[in-house]
Image (tube, rainbow, N blue to C red):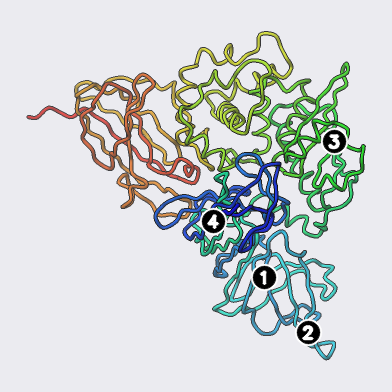
Amino acid sequence: MQLPLKFIFTSSVVAAVVFAKVASAQLIVEETLSIAGTVESVSRDLLVVKDESGKAYPVRVQAVDKQSVQLEGGQFLRSPAEIEVTGSYSVDDLQPGQNIRFEAKLNKLGRATGEVNEISLVTGEDEPNGLKVIAEGSKPGDHSTCEIVAQFNRTTNGRLVVKIPTNNGFTRKSTLSIPIAKETNVRFMSNDINRAGAGSTVKKLVAVRLNTGDIVAKTVRIEVTRGTTARASIDDALLAKYRHLSDEPLKPRLIRSQHYAFMSDISERQAQIILDKLETMTMLLSKYFGQSPSGIVEGFIVRDLSVWPDGLLKEPAGIAKIQSRAGICFNSSLGDRRRAILYSCDDHGVIQHECTHGFCHLAFGSTGPTWLAEGLAEMGQYWKVDKLAVDANPRVIAYLQGSEPKRKLLEIAIPGRTDPGTWKDYAWRWALCHLLANNPNYADRFKPLAMALMKQREGASFQTVYGPTARQIAFEYGLFLDTLDNGYRADLCAWQWNQKFSQLSGKRRTQVKISAARGWQATGVLLEQDASYDLAAVGDWKIANDGGKYDADGDQAGRGRLVAVIFNDFQLSDPFPIGKLKTFVSPTTGQLFLRCQDDWNKLSDNSGELTVHVRKTPPPQ
């Protein structure tokens, strides 16, 4: 059968593609795409690129440490991509604690001659910090040319100050101070797609579109700048911490920490990283609930099933989950003795999700109803130390924002155990649990409710706890979904339900402080339909830590402008600008709320406040 422009897709697409089957379904290449543009988002193996016309392309990218890429329909495809993320910065862009590589001429006393002309940023996957002699000096006191991988400390008086390990085999000095040339640049190169942030330039993207609709990358070239390089993540920090360990996969053996013990074939480096993540997660959950697990989570983390001896993995359902790149935690109880046994692929998010189930069972005796169990498990993999902001998979956020109609509260908080469903069902449960746990209007009731449900106390339910405030929760939940993004702070956007409102009469005026770092804020003014009001805002505020100050008119694009909205019977009007001075006729009766116009996920770095004076417009003389 001839297929013009169409080929059977295999693990390697080069020119014409040969035949293969994946997950018992034939995948066909319908066209080859060449895309240039900018990065809209990156999430694990999903890169979203916008071309010059504004059209968005969701592209699946198999990372270098993965054996396959998961398609939208659940199939797994081996299609390693050639990834290159590059950038160039100034030395002033370096941050303390970053690891860098450069060449310098040193003697045994750690003294340098000449200048450093080129610096490279080091990622967590590179070799450990240290010093390697490239060209040794002819005499003992001569300077040798050395390649140095070190931790950046600072620049001062034209010198680069770095720290290296004391056991470097060359010099006893652990702090080096080396002259740098004025035009020295810092180069960045990585094969990790997640180092490209929003706004990065896609110089080259060659991909294929399959008959499933999936677009799969073969070659990716991205150029980043200081502002578009993805921030160093916790994964980066852990990679740097355990960079001295081998990343070569091993045969199944025991890996363990205080609260976890697994048989696994992952590398020593990955083992320490995931155990570190799990212990941090356990610490956060124990601190939040005020209760620790009664035992350890046991089980299996599998990278490659083919290297496991027959009979070691005994649960067919667990093996099936691993084969589908998923996981499951088998929880059981015998009297007061509880056990939690994990079967999981080596995806860190999957492991953390399932181990949250294990924590809850070991700490409370059950994981509670499905909506709570899966919502908490999703929170468990996203929680970070001292971080209140949303930090979730962009795919999840995009789904919640774009889904219509939105699921209602009682469609999510269903009593008892139900079908866990797909990642989309998990997304709704996470959203509800995140809001309830982080919004101060509801957080003080969420923790005792969650504990009562997991302890299976009679009478405990979502409806009995939150029923009296159902309309308020539904309103804030809807607002949360409409404005949700990574960086969003539910605590800063909580609605001020307890604020009293009254009408202005005669010459009565009122004034209110409006913070730049909060969402909609109550003025206490109850507007009358068709009545005219005057507002005057005094002061200035900032919409970034290192940004300039703005008055209530904001900048030319409207950022930092004072804006208003009218709340009436749980409905909001369209926002409208106020600025420094504004007279407007209220189109409806309702409560007046004000805020600083800024992205909802960027409020936490704002500062300052305005004093806003409000009065009814005086009648003409």
Residue 558 lies left or right of residue 215; in this view the side is left
- Residue wearing tag 1: 161
1 vs 2, front mark = 2
Q: Measured along the vertical axis of the image, is residue 303 above or below residue 92?
A: above
Residue 63 lies left or right of residue 467; in this view the side is right
Earlier residue among tags 1 and 2: 2
Q: Secondary structure at mark 3?
A: strand
Q: Amino acid at mark 4?
A: Pro
- Residue wearing tag 4: 4
C-alpha gap between disc 3 and disc 1: 46 Å
Query: Looking at the image, which residue is at 32% across and 29% down?
Result: 573
Q: Amino acid at mark 2?
A: Ala
- Residue wearing tag 2: 135
- Residue wearing tag 3: 299
Residue 343 rendering spot, x and y as whole percentages: 80, 35
C-alpha gap between disc 3 and disc 2: 50 Å
Q: Amino acid at mark 3?
A: Gly
Earlier residue among tags 4 and 2: 4
